Amino acid sequence: MYKFRRMSISDYNEVINLWKNTDGIGLSGNDESKKSIKKFLRHNPKTCFVATIDDEEIIGTIMAGDDGRRGNIYHLMVKHEHRKNGIGKDLLERAEKALKKDGVRKIFLVVFKSNEVGNKFWKKNGYDLRDDLNYLNKVIDD
C-alpha cells in the first residue's frame, strides 16, 4: 500500500501543497520556491524521499542534506490521516541511512517549540533537545 521513492522536482506541486496544509510546519517563502527546491534536490539527490499510496498520492515527505560534515533534516511530515503507521519513521530511516552513506555522523534539525507532535516524534526517534545553543538566522535576500 505505502511506497517510498526519492523526491524529484516533478513532485513539487503536490509536496508544497502538503507542506502548506500541515500544522506545525513553517515555510519561509523563497526557501520553498520551486527554483530553491530544485537546487536543493540537485545538491542532495539521494537524501530526499516521498511516501505514496500505490505510487500515486504523496502522503509524506522528508528533505535531508549535508554540508559534507553535518546533516540537516527539513520538512518531515505525514498527512494526518496516515500517521501512526510507521511512515514518518520509515522516511527518517531512509534519510539517515543515505546521510550516513555520504559520511555524515551528526544530524541537526529545527522544530517549533509549539509543535508538540513533532517534538514527541523526534525524541522518540533518538533526537535530543540541546539547551546549549541559540538558533540564529539572518535574511540576506528579500
Image (cartoon, helix red, strand yellow):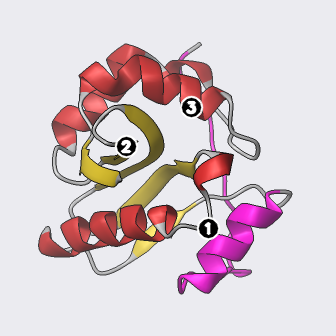
**Residue 72, placed above or below residue 81:** below
Please report the residue visible at 69 percent of the width from the left and 63 percent of the height from the top: 118
Q: Nearer the viewer, mark 3 or mark 1?
A: 1
Amino acid at dot 1? Lys
Name the image quarter holding residue 131.
bottom right
**Tag 1 and tag 2, C-beta contact below 8 Å:** no
Find disc 3 in the rendering and name its residue. 18
- Left or right of 12? Residue 138 is right
- Secondary structure, mark 3, is helix
Amino acid at dot 3? Leu
- Secondary structure, mark 1, is loop
Please report the residue visible at 31 percent of the width from the left and 63 percent of the height from the top: 95
Badge 1 or badge 2: first in the primary sequence: 2
Residue 139: image tag: none
Find disc 1 in the rendering and name its residue. 84
Name the image quarter holding residue 8.
top left
Q: Main secondary structure of the magenta part?
A: loop
Q: Confirm whether the magenta stretch covers residue 96.
A: no
Find disc 2 in the rendering and name its residue. 52
Badge 3 or badge 1: first in the primary sequence: 3
Rounded to the nearest angstrom, the CA distance separating label 1 from label 2 is 15 Å
Q: Which residues are magenta?
A: 115-141
